[in-house]
Image (cartoon, grey):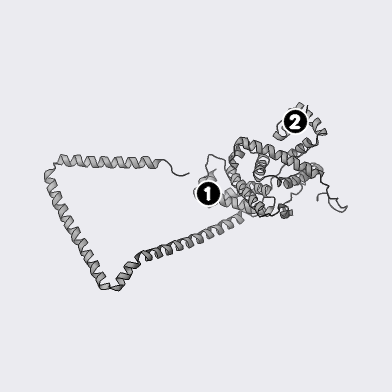
Amino acid sequence: MNHRPFEDWLLEDQRLTSDEERELQAHLRVCTSCAAIAESNLALHSTRMVSPTEGFVPRFEMRLAENRKAMRIRQIIGTTIFVLAGLAFLYWLASPFIQEVMRSPADWITNVVGYFLFIVTSVQALSEVSHVFTHLLSDFISPIGWLVILFLVSGLGVVEVLSIWQFTRTPQGV
Amino acid sequence: MVWVVQAQHGSDEAFTKLVEAYQAHVYNLCYRMLGDAESAEDAAQETFLRAYQHLYRYDQKRSFATWLLSIAAHYCIDRLRRRKFSMVSMDAEEDENSLELLDADAPNPETEMMRKEQRERLQILLKGLDGMDRAAIIMRYWYDCSESEIAEALHLTVSAVKSRLHRARRELAGLWQEDSRRPKPERRPHESPAF
């Protein structure tokens, strides 16, 4: 037999029959390159595990604690930078307004009181309008009509809840 | 597996148990990949740290050991790549503390010594292999991983693993032959044959 099949057996690290093993041994006596493969395969089959030195777990726990501390510091620094940047941006946005207020504070207070009064009177007017409207509607719509409206509104609510549940059921991400 | 589930739910105690159980597994892979005890310790610690940080990503259908070995192997491959760029010679990092000791209880001390020498020689020759090939060989022979397990851990196809193993065995044999031809330093008369 020529060199090729022996080399393939060794490189594939195949299990051999006793006849094949005998043929291979005979070949190894005359072929140095196959002998080298056989020797390195043998060394690979006699491997051993090495273990870390004593105290690996406490060392890991210490490293984990250090890592957590570093992460917390990074988070604090990140949050501080974010907040400061946000405040600076807000100041930049509000600076024309602040300058205006500083120029004439009395005008500004009058404006604010004016706006406040406008909002209060608007809310009062709206509540009166809605009160009158509901009184009028109750005369126009019969109790059965109210039941139908209630049924439709609750049906729509159920459809909405079901659709939200359907969309959120599929896991997101990983 | 109970520890994994507990650790995934935030139990530090369960994760410590996992570190205790798998420390030798992970350390051995790092040691075989990187070749020295100090780097192996650092890489093994980093592997567990990464595992801790990404535990939520672990799929319980997979083997936890293979998942850990996958993290360790990829970390070591990256480290080898960086090492290559920074031109640090691995030979300069030889660590005598990590050399194996002879098994005193072995039935045949001479054969045991020969095997030990072979293992040390293999450890040195492993450094001649490409990082991915080295990881495949280590997982195959030190952990008895199947080709599909290696493929899963190293994110390769099974046929790629087969061809990498084939190529690595050939390269290793070439290095073995080359190393055999190199003249060995003479042992001084007072020296122990173990050194």
**Is residue B21 at all visible to an observer of this figure?**
no
Residue named by callout 2: A4
- Image position of A36 (left or right of A55): right
Q: Nearer the viewer, residue B104 or B121?
A: B121
Q: Secondary structure at mark 2?
A: helix
Q: Nearer the viewer, residue B123 or A50?
A: B123
Residue A82, placed above or below residue B162 = below
Q: Secondary structure at mark 1?
A: loop
- Image position of A85 (left or right of A120): right
The x, y position of residue A100, in whole percent, is 30, 70
Total numbered badges shown on the rendered structure: 2
The label number, if any, that marks residue B68 in the structure image: none
Amino acid residing under circle 1: His
Q: Nearer the viewer, residue B167 or B119?
A: B167
- 2 and 1 marks on the same chain: no
The Cα atoms of the two marked residues, 2 and 1, are separated by 47 Å
- Image position of B125 (left or right of B10): right
Residue named by callout 1: B54
Amino acid residing under circle 2: Arg
Which one is closest to the eye, mark 2 or mark 1?
2
Q: Nearer the viewer, residue B150 or A92?
A: A92
